[in-house]
Image: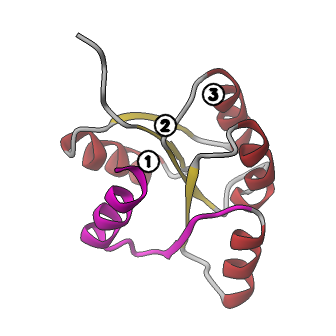
Amino acid sequence: MGNDKKRILVIEDDEEMRSLLKDFFEEDGFEIDSVSNGSEAFRKIAREPFDLIITDIRMPGLTGLDILPGIKKLQPEVSIIVITAFGSEEVSRKAFDRGATAYLEKPILFNKLRTLVHEMVF
């Protein structure tokens, strides 16, 4: 039997939030991989294809904004949702300019996130 599950990569330095997102999407039937920083994300993205990437913006080392162009270079077709607790119009604009497909501010409304993800990957 083939694996038809859609694959999501969660890039989030906050362990509790990363775990929450992982559990949420696994319950929804997705295959989830998660990493805590941009460097780990690049190693994963270089080796494995994903249907969707969800990244936080504020992380130690490479930020979510820093890694967006590299993600698009490695997987040009992938959809990317950027999430942040420190949003602004400028941050939103930068995220979209660098390749984000969607932008959400924390606290995340999980029903809204589920709808957005389903629109992107199905």
- Residue 96: quadrant of the picture: bottom right
Residue 109 lies, in percent from the top left, at 31, 74
Q: Earlier in the sequence, mark 3 or mark 1?
A: 1
**First to last magenta residue range:** 99-122
Alpha carbon separation for disc pair 3 and 1: 16 Å
User: Which residue is under mark 3?
Assistant: 44
| Occupied quadrant, residue 47 | top right
Is residue 114 a member of the stretch shown in magenta?
Answer: yes
Q: CA distance from mark 2 to mark 1?
A: 7 Å
Q: Earlier in the sequence, mark 2 or mark 1?
A: 1
The residue identified by callout 1 is 18
Q: Amino acid at mark 3?
A: Lys
Secondary structure under tag 2 reads strand
Label 1: element kind:
helix
Is 14 a magenta residue?
no
In the rendered image, the residue lying farthest to the top is 1
Q: Which residue is mark 2?
A: 34
**First in sequence: mark 2 or mark 3?**
2
**In the image: residue 113, left or right of residue 106:** left
Kindly report which numbered mark, 3 or 1, lies closer to the viewer in this rendering.
3
Q: Amino acid at mark 2?
A: Ser
Q: Mark 1 is on which residue type?
A: Arg
Residue at 58% in and 24% down: 48
The colour mode here is: secondary structure
Q: In which quadrant will I find the N terminus?
A: top left
Alpha-carbon span between mark 2 and mark 3: 9 Å
